[in-house]
Image (spheres, grey):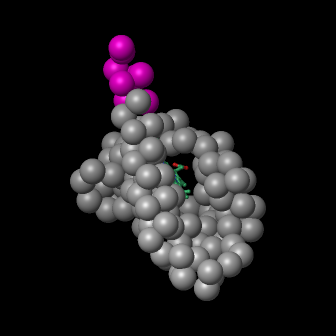
Amino acid sequence: MNARSMMMSGLMAVVALTMGACAKELASEPTAMAAAPGPKSGKDIYAQWCADCHDPGPGHPGTLRMEGDFGAESSVLLRFPNLDAETVKFAVRNGFQMMPPFRVTEISDEELDRLAQFVVKK
Ligand code: HEC
């Protein structure tokens, strides 16, 4: 196993863990689900799909990578300067280097619009 495939399997583990955590959350909150049908808010989508990798602090691979690429000032996604909605949408649908792409079944187009607005709004 080379370093890259080890890194990828590490990432997949993070993704799998995230999904496991979400499934548990959904199972234990049936009333919250029933009360909030339809598309989720940008903030909720961020918390569900992005926070594990992009929140501030150690243990977040997105933040770590972006610190290496862009410096500490620009390492936290929600504080990234001059980020536009199109870039966010492109990164989410296509993936970005180490970041996995997200499908419409995970984040709908409407939810992606909300997510992009939430991420670029400072
Ligand atoms: C499994 C971890 C992971 C998840 C989940 C993740 N990202 Fe990322 N993201 C990364 C990494 C790592 C990078 C840095 C890319 C690199 O240099 O490899 C990145 C980079 C980005 C960038 C920067 C693109 C640029 O122009 O530099 C954006 C925007 C972004 N992510 C948005 C999101 C959004 C929105 C979500 C939630 C839907 C998300 N990411 C979920 C890991 C993740």
**Magenta segment: does it hold 7?**
yes
Q: Quadrant of residue 79?
A: bottom left
Identify whether 103 is placed above or below 43: above
Say whether residue 14 is left or right of residue 92. left
The residue positioned farthest toward the right in the image shown: 109
Would residue 118 be seen by someone viewing this image from the given angle? Answer: no
Identify whether 4 is placed above or below 98: above
**Magenta segment: does it hold 84?**
no
Query: x and y percent of residue 28 in the render?
Result: 44, 71
Can you say which quadrant of the picture contains the N terminus? top left
Query: x and y percent of residue 102 in the render?
Result: 62, 48
Magenta stretch: helix, strand or loop mostly: helix
Span highlighted in magenta in the image: 1-8
Say whether residue 119 is left or right of residue 102. left
User: In the image, what residue occupies the spot 45% across and 44% down?
Assistant: 16
Would residue 95 be seen by someone viewing this image from the given angle? Answer: yes
Query: x and y percent of residue 34 in the render?
Result: 62, 80
Identify whether 27 is placed above or below 67: below
Query: x and y percent of residue 88 in the render?
Result: 61, 57
The residue positioned farthest toward the bottom in the image shown: 35
User: In the image, what residue occupies the spot 33% across and 52% down?
Assistant: 60
User: In the image, what residue occupies the spot 56% across and 61% down?
Assistant: 83
The residue positioned farthest toward the top in the image shown: 1
User: In the image, what residue occupies the spot 67% across and 63% down?
Assistant: 112
Say whether residue 82 is left or right of residue 84. left
Q: How many numbered dots are placed on residues in this image?
A: 0
The residue nearer to you, when weighing 58 against 48, is 48
